[in-house]
């Protein structure tokens, strides 16, 4: 029994280098794909267009709060106690409204970014499948690799294919 096990292990060890010599491996950098692909720029422009209006509203709200705060500080000594109290309450209400709107906008932006990224990762997967099939790769690894020879990096091939899609 032990001799059979030893024989199997020996045959596996001997055949492993021959098997691995035929293995075609590629490595990609998802970080590079997510920063340099033309689709990412298109996604950023889409998000900018969609959220620029609400962001401008937030900026206006912040300006109004700052103006109100300056007005309160400037006129504090001349205001009656009730007027000062009302002004401070108004300012606090505006601050709360600003924070609530900012929070909603931030959450909505995060959700839309995740949706767009999910769609884009699907595009990357299809392009990766195409490159792997056409290049006859047996294995493609991503950023989790500790070291890979630069010749194994096929990120630029994937980027080139993504640029064709636009």
Image (tube, rainbow, N blue to C red):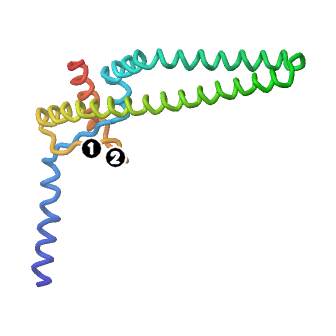
Q: Quadrant of the N terminus?
A: bottom left
* Place of residue 13 in the rendered image (x, y in percent of width and height, measured from the top left): 17, 65
Residue 74 image offset from top left, x and y in percent: 84, 15
Disc 2 target residue: 145
Instruction: Classify 18 as above or below 49.
Output: below
Asked if the residues shown at circle 2 and circle 1 are in contact, with their CB atoms under 8 angstroms apart, the answer is: yes
Q: Residue 145, image x and y in percent?
A: 34, 46
Pointer 1 residue? 141
Q: Nearer the viewer, residue 146 or 103?
A: 103
Q: Residue at x 15, y 77 (%)?
A: 6
Total labels: the figure holds 2
- Mark 2 lies on a secondary structure that is loop
* Near-viewer residue (6 or 108): 108
CA distance separating discs 2 and 1:
7 Å
Location of residue 149 (image quadrant)? top left
Q: Residues within 10 Å of mark 2 (few under 14, many from 20)?
A: few
- Identify the image quadrant of residue 7: bottom left
Query: In screen coordinates, is 120 left or right of 12?
Result: right
Foreground residue among 37 and 19: 37
Q: Which mark is residue 149?
A: none
Q: Could you tell me which quadrant the C terminus lies in?
A: top left
Q: Is residue 139 above or below residue 86?
A: below
Left or right of 34, for residue 57: right
- At x 65%, y 27%, the residue is 93
Disc 1 crowd, CA 10 A, few/some/many (<14, 14-19, 20+):
some
């Amino acid at each position: 029994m032990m001799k059979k096990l030893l024989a199997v292990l020996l045959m596996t060890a001997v055949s492993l280098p021959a098997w691995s010599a035929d293995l075609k491996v590629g490595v990609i950098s998802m970080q590079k794909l997510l920063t340099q692909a033309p689709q990412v720029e298109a996604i950023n422009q889409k998000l900018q267009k969609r959220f620029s209006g609400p962001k401008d509203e937030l900026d206006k709200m912040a300006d109004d709060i700052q103006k109100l705060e300056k007005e309160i500080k400037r006129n504090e000594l001349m205001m009656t106690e009730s007027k000062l109290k009302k002004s401070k309450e108004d300012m606090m209400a505006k601050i709360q409204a600003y924070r609530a709107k900012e929070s909603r906008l931030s959450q909505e932006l995060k959700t839309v970014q995740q949706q767009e990224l999910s769609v884009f990762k699907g595009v990357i997967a299809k392009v990766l499948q195409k490159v792997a099939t056409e290049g006859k790769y047996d294995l493609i690894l991503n950023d989790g690799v500790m070291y890979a020879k630069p010749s194994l990096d096929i990120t630029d091939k994937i980027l080139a294919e993504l640029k064709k899609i636009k």
